[in-house]
Image (cartoon, helix red, strand yellow):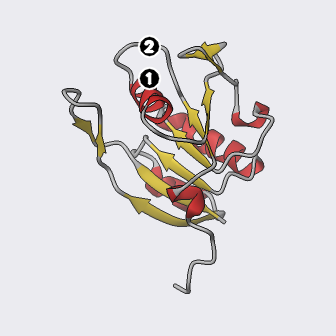
């Protein structure tokens, strides 16, 4: 594999993040991830994406990443695994260059189904706020 020409800043220092599957439901992964990104020091713009919510934690929600009017650098995808391919397609149409996927069951099939996936890095560990524990939930996918 040759050198990666993509700017990794979209993953490590994104200017904007879409949390797809952000939720108001107490105790859900969607709520925990959105709260962690939104409340704990991230300086960029955070867009909650949830087709069933007008807002998440008082922030206007969007039904799809395609409805977000501004560019998005990184998507954090927290949806049932059956929806991941559709969401990844929308991220590609939106020109989102990096994604963190919290549905691991279908990753191997996604690599086969989507030639646009240039790199897959599974790092399945996420730490929540103190006393909330940790979960095995994330994978990074670079879209070329």
Residue denoted by label 2:
25
Q: Residue at x 34, y 56 (%)?
A: 123
Query: In terms of depth relative to the viewer, which is nearer, 70 or 52?
Result: 70
Q: Which mark is residue 89?
A: none
Residue 112 falls in which quadrant of the image? bottom right
Label 1 Cα crowd, 10 Å radius (few <14 / some 14-19 / many 20+): many
Residue denoted by label 1:
31
Residue 8 horizontal/vertical position (percent): 56, 66
Residue 40 falls in which quadrant of the image? top left
Tell me which numbered mark, 1 or 2, is placed earlier along the sequence.
2
Question: Which residue is most to the right?
Answer: 69
Left or right: residue 101 versus residue 117 is left
Residue 14 horizontal/vertical position (percent): 59, 52
Secondary structure state at the residue bearing disc 1: helix
Left or right: residue 90 versus residue 142 is right
Distance, label 1 to label 2, CA atoms, is 6 Å
């Amino acid at each position: 594999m040759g050198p990666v020409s993509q700017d990794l800043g979209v993953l490590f220092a994104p200017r904007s993040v879409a949390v797809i599957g952000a939720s108001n439901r107490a105790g859900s992964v969607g709520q925990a991830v959105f709260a962690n990104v939104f409340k704990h020091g991230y300086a960029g713009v955070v867009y909650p994406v949830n087709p069933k919510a007008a807002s998440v934690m008082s922030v206007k929600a969007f039904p799809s990443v395609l409805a977000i009017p501004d560019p998005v650098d990184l998507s954090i995808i927290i949806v049932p695994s059956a929806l991941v391919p559709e969401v990844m397609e929308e991220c590609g149409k939106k020109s989102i260059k990096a994604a963190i996927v919290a549905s691991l069951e279908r990753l191997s099939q996604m690599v086969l189904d989507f030639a646009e996936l240039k790199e897959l890095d599974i790092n399945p560990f996420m730490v929540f706020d103190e006393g909330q524990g940790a979960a095995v939930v994330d994978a990074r996918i670079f879209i070329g």
